[in-house]
Image (cartoon, grey):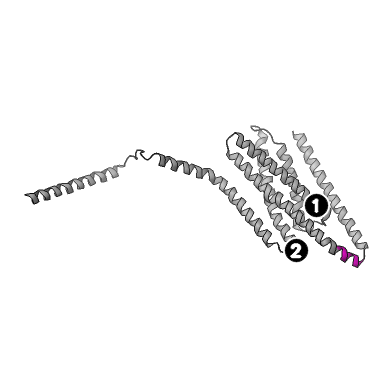
């Protein structure tokens, strides 16, 4: 198991190095070609490519939004729901749903990365591109860690769970931050308004965060409802034993009542006599 895990990690690092090298080669060749053309052709090609490049950027952003901005957080929510359930069919359904959502997220992120390498000038001179490259490596690392899950009850299980949880949480949070930087970069390059997209994405993240926090309180809320239900279903439940002070108060109250009744009786007798 350790050999296969090390081999998969080595292959992942090798693929990332090859992708990075091909990116720099394509950028350098693109610079040489553009330097050899005249000024008029550069202006015409820039105007033609601008609309096409804008569409590529929009598709790239939507793919990464769906991947790191939606599928990954929802996958985290599903596995949290599975951890709170007892063993049964529901746990298996939630676990497989988590795996499917994460695999789809990785596939969408891979398509977005391929589009970026093929169509964009990846000079890695800004935070969005550098963070995107690190996130792409992290999601594939997380994928391999998920596949090589040790069985429960072993010593490696605790280490695997902690590593898988940390990488998944950090990757999801950094992916959300990188979507904001991507919206900012899109506005900077295209001069188009991204306010509505920023508002929609922020509303989605707030809803996911609220549901994430609500999961921790749901079990407590259910217990509170169960206690209240028991109280309502047993209206004839015996009262709690009174304390000594309460008993003294009750005795004195009974004496006062008896004195009042005696006084009323004497008054009635005097009237009839």
Label 2 Cα crowd, 10 Å radius (few <14 / some 14-19 / many 20+) = few
Mark closer to the observer (2, 1): 1
Quarter containing the N terminus? top right
* Residue stretch in magenta: 38-45
Q: Is residue 153 above or below residue 132?
A: above
Residue at position x 80%, y 44% from top?
13
Q: Position of residue 131 (x, y in %)?
A: 74, 53
The residue indicated by pointer 2 is 188
Q: Position of residue 173 (x, y in %)?
A: 67, 51
Q: Position of residue 142 (x, y in %)?
A: 72, 43
Of 177 and 197, nearer the camera is 197
The residue indicated by pointer 1 is 115
* Label 2 – label 1 distance at C-alpha: 19 Å
Q: Position of residue 156 (x, y in %)?
A: 68, 35
Label 1 Cα crowd, 10 Å radius (few <14 / some 14-19 / many 20+) = some
Of 23 and 226, nearer the camera is 226
């Amino acid at each position: 198991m350790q050999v296969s895990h090390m081999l998969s990690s080595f292959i992942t690092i090798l693929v990332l190095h090859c992708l990075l090298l091909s990116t720099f080669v394509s950028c350098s060749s693109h610079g040489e070609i553009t330097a050899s053309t005249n000024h008029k052709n550069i202006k015409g090609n820039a105007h033609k490519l601008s609309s096409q490049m804008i569409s590529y950027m929009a598709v790239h952003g939507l793919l990464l939004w769906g991947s790191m901005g939606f599928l990954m957080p929802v996958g985290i929510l599903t596995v949290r729901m599975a951890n709170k359930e007892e063993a049964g069919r529901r746990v298996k359904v939630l676990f497989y749903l988590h795996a499917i959502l994460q695999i789809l997220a990785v596939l969408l992120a891979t398509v977005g990365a391929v589009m970026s390498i093929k169509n964009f000038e990846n000079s890695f001179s800004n935070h969005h591109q550098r963070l995107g490259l690190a996130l792409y490596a992290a999601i594939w690392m997380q994928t391999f860690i998920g596949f090589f899950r040790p069985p429960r009850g072993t010593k490696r299980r605790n280490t695997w769970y902690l590593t898988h949880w940390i990488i998944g949480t950090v990757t999801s949070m950094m992916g959300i931050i990188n979507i904001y930087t991507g919206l900012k970069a899109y506005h900077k390059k295209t001069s188009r308004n991204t306010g509505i997209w920023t508002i929609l994405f922020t509303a989605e993240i707030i809803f996911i965060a609220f549901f994430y926090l609500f999961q921790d309180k749901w079990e407590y809320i259910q217990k509170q409802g169960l206690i209240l239900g028991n109280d309502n279903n047993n209206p004839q439940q015996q009262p709690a034993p009174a304390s000594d002070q309460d008993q003294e108060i009750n005795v004195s109250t009974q004496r006062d009542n008896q004195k009042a009744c005696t006084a009323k009786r004497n008054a009635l007798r005097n009237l009839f006599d």
